Amino acid sequence: MNRICITLLLSVFTCVSNAQDIHFTQWMHAPHTYSPSSIGDFDGVYRFHGNYRNQWSSVTVPFTTFAGMVETSSFDYVKGLSAAAGLVYDVSGDSEFSTTHLNIGLGYKVNLSDSNGVFRFGFLPNATQKKIDLNALKFNNQYNGYYFDGNLSTGEDLPRLSRWYFDFALGAEYSGFINNKFKLRSGFAVYNILSPQQSFFNNNDIRLDRRYSIQLNGTYQFSEKVLIKPGIQFSNQGMYYSVNFGGIVEYDLSKTIYFKQMIFAGAYFRAVDSGDLIIGLDYDNWRVGVSYDINYSGLVPASNYRGGVELAAIYIIPNKIIRPKYKVCPDY
């Protein structure tokens, strides 16, 4: 019963601090989770990204999240159109409560003729399954007076142990250069627009709240080799909210424009919850990040400041590079 109580407590706490929906610390490396307008927002033909998160392993059965998506920004007949398909899978606690999102989305960009700014819009439909496994839990009714007997009835009667629903999200963003050193990006998105029914008790009044997401981040060219990337993300869902703010510093090690090598490190803070350390590297067409959450919330007595580890990997197939047809030799 203690483990069940801890699992329920963590489930409630996760909803409060992270706006209920699935989240990642490296939100900048899981763009489809904060705005559909990010679809196609990359320099290349195809983008593949994957995310893995393991949380609360120091307290109870870990909460584990996987995500992956593939995108393309190349459509010969519709200029500015992009498309994506992805999967998000999350499993939480002793009950192995799982959430599976299947996504197929579209993005569209509009280049502003009177400036270097870009507007992007995104549409992300998804089919979701939520499922619980009562056989993974232990109940008082299964105690026969001497010991736990898994063959005894749990005494729990749920009308359903699984539920599917359809929903979609919309997003818009603007990006452009403020000056020759600073590029700004701002975005707004709404998830769970249909507020679908999600009750296992067939209670039509229990619906998933809409989630509103606002992002503001930038890139500042501090020097020839150093980029500073500050950012803030705000999410609100029902009575819950989440605020992430911080930044990353990148150092360019590249020796040629045709082969990128860069290291980065930074910190983000999730208000009243945790501090997040992030390190990683860019190597050619790969970007890999590792982060760790240092928990300083009310769960510190149980977590001992240990939160979760997270991995992110992005691979981009670039546009074809047009190289010079001749080589220019330097003068001596």
Image (spheres, rainbow, N blue to C red):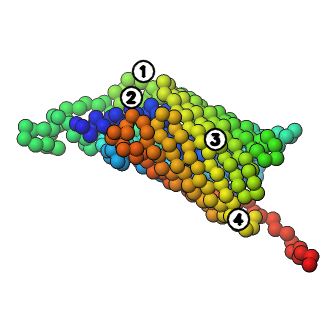
Image point (17%, 34%), residue name: 140
Q: Are marks 3 and 4 in contact (CB under 8 Å)?
A: no
Q: Position of residue 42 (x, y in %)?
A: 69, 51
In the image, taking residue 166 as reference, residue 249 lies left or right, namely right
Check disc 2 and give the amino acid type. Ser
Q: Are marks 1 and 4 in contact (CB under 8 Å)?
A: no
Disc 2 to disc 1, C-alpha distance: 8 Å
Q: Position of residue 11 (x, y in %)?
A: 38, 36
Q: Which residue is mark 2?
A: 199
Image point (28%, 35%), residue name: 5
Disc 3 to disc 4, C-alpha distance: 25 Å
Disc 1 to disc 4, C-alpha distance: 56 Å
Question: Is residue 87 depicted above or below 234 in this figure?
Answer: below
Check disc 1 and give the amino acid type. Asp
Label located before the other in sequence (3 or 2): 2
Q: Position of residue 80 (x, y in %)?
A: 75, 45
Image point (58%, 30%), residue name: 212
Q: SS class of the residue under badge 2?
A: loop
Q: SS class of the residue under badge 4?
A: loop
Label located before the other in sequence (2 or 4): 2
Q: Are marks 2 and 4 in contact (CB under 8 Å)?
A: no
Disc 3 to disc 1, C-alpha distance: 37 Å
In the picture, the disc for residue 231 is 3
Q: SS class of the residue under badge 3?
A: strand
Image point (33%, 34%), residue name: 8
In the image, taking residue 135 as reference, residue 100 lies left or right, namely right
Label located before the other in sequence (3 or 4): 3
> Around disc 2, counting alpha carbons within 10 Å, would you say few (fewer than 14), some (14 to 19), or many (20 or more)?
some
Q: Which residue is mark 1?
A: 205
Check disc 4 and give the amino acid type. Ser
Q: SS class of the residue under badge 1?
A: loop
